[in-house]
């Protein structure tokens, strides 16, 4: 079965698999999870991982997005923790400035000692038909690497939808990883993969924008002053694993660098303004009072409103540790975006004739 196989067809096998843990769906050659999986989405919610004979089921213990719960799990043993230093409680999943960037779809993760793997294969594949029977036989002929130093690593998925191509083939759903591995598998978990999972799980504060005059009292031909209210600072998210002696981590750090506001109408001069954010005692801030660029509405919104929008651009870096102040690593991650929208009313300034 060729790499890059799409996993949409696995859902039918998931519902009919009878063995616990990760199976090969009979007659398809596709691995499947036993029982109905958790509902997954493409924002980082991990699926129900294979059963672990050691007693650690690896099931999701929480929302991996980190923005509301602050922590969670992806895959079997990857922990996600997010730290927000600002006071803003309104968050949204980060939007990537590079539409072509995609988070990791799947990866190999440490799962079993040789003895645990033997137990897993014998219990999960007992009575299995082809091609599952041949898969189990091949592992038995290897004697599960019993007596060797190392671990069996198993494929894990970022979500349960299987709509993205996973480069891991069903013939290698588990791989043997010795301590002195001559050449790592390209899909084996690394800090770089962890950084992608952390970034995909990041939730960013929406811009705490305050307008002056207030949104329901903006005036024609009067500059609109924009401020950020509250403690608005950087956000970092750490993805880490510490299981059976395998320890690694990656931390993505999102720093707010610019605020862009959009008047929501062509009847404004200019339609958009961009301000650099300045680091202050209580985080990053902007006050457009004396800025060269300020939106001025030239026409009343009448009985309706204009859709005013404010967007923060976040510079995102990552380091191969749990320390957000560690040295930045490559390859670089795309900028993040968070957006706030608000309807504003613009009225004519009423003059009094005497």
Image: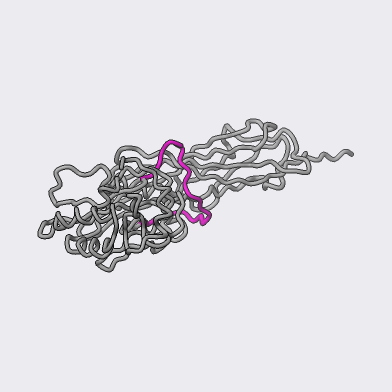
> Which is more toward the observer, 188 or 231?
188
* Whether residue 20 is situated above or below residue 332 in the rendered picture: below
Q: Position of residue 196 (x, y in %)?
A: 36, 45
The question of residue 320 being in magenta is answered with no
> Which is more toward the observer, 100 or 133?
133
The question of residue 101 being in magenta is answered with yes
> Which is more toward the observer, 252 or 220?
252
Residue reaching furthest to the right: 354
Q: Viewed as shown, does residue 302 lie left or right of 132? A: right
SS assignment for the magenta stretch, majority? loop
Q: Viewed as shown, does residue 274 lie left or right of 10? A: right
Residue drawn at (87%, 38%) of the image = 353
Q: Position of residue 293 (x, y in %)?
A: 58, 33
Q: Position of residue 57 (x, y in %)?
A: 32, 65
* Whether residue 241 is situated above or below residue 276 in the rendered picture: below
Residue drawn at (40%, 51%) of the image = 10
Residue drawn at (28%, 43%) of the image = 327
**Highlighted range, magenta:** 80-104
Quadrant housing the C terminus: top right
Residue reaching furthest to the bottom: 55
In this rendering, does residue 84 appear at all? no
Quadrant housing the N terminus: top left
In this rendering, does residue 352 appear at all? yes
Q: Position of residue 340 (x, y in %)?
A: 57, 46
């Amino acid at each position: 079965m060729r790499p890059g196989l799409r996993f949409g067809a696995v859902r039918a096998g998931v519902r009919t698999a009878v063995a616990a843990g990760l199976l090969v769906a009979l007659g398809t050659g596709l691995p499947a999870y036993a029982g109905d999986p958790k509902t997954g989405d493409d924002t980082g919610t991990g699926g129900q991982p294979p059963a672990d004979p050691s007693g650690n089921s690896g099931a999701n213990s929480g929302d991996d997005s980190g923005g509301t719960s602050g922590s969670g799990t992806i895959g079997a043993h990857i922990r996600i923790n997010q730290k927000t230093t600002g006071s803003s409680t309104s968050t949204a999943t980060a939007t990537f400035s590079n539409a072509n960037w995609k988070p990791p779809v799947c990866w190999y993760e440490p799962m079993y000692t040789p003895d645990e793997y033997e137990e897993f294969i014998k219990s999960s594949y007992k009575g299995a038909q082809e091609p599952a029977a041949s898969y189990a036989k091949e592992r038995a002929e290897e004697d599960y690497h019993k007596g060797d130093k190392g671990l069996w690593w198993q494929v894990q998925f970022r979500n349960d939808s299987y709509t993205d191509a996973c480069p891991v083939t069903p013939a290698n759903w588990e791989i043997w990883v010795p301590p002195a591995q001559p050449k790592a598998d390209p899909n084996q978990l690394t800090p770089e993969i962890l950084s992608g999972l952390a970034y995909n799980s990041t939730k960013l504060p929406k811009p705490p924008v305050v307008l002056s005059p207030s949104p329901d009292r903006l005036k024609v031909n009067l500059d609109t002053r924009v401020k950020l209210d509250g403690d608005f600072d950087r956000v970092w998210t750490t993805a880490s694993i510490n299981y059976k002696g395998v320890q690694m981590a990656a931390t993505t750090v999102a720093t707010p660098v610019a605020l862009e506001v959009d008047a929501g109408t062509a009847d404004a001069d200019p339609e958009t303004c961009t301000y650099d954010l300045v680091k202050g005692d209580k985080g990053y801030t902007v006050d457009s009072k004396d800025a060269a660029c300020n939106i001025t509405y030239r026409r009343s919104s009448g009985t309706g409103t204009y859709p005013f929008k404010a967007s923060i651009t976040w510079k995102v870096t990552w380091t191969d540790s749990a320390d957000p102040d560690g040295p930045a690593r490559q390859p670089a991650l795309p900028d993040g975006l968070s957006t706030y929208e608000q309807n504003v009313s613009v009225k004519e300034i009423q003059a009094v004739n005497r």
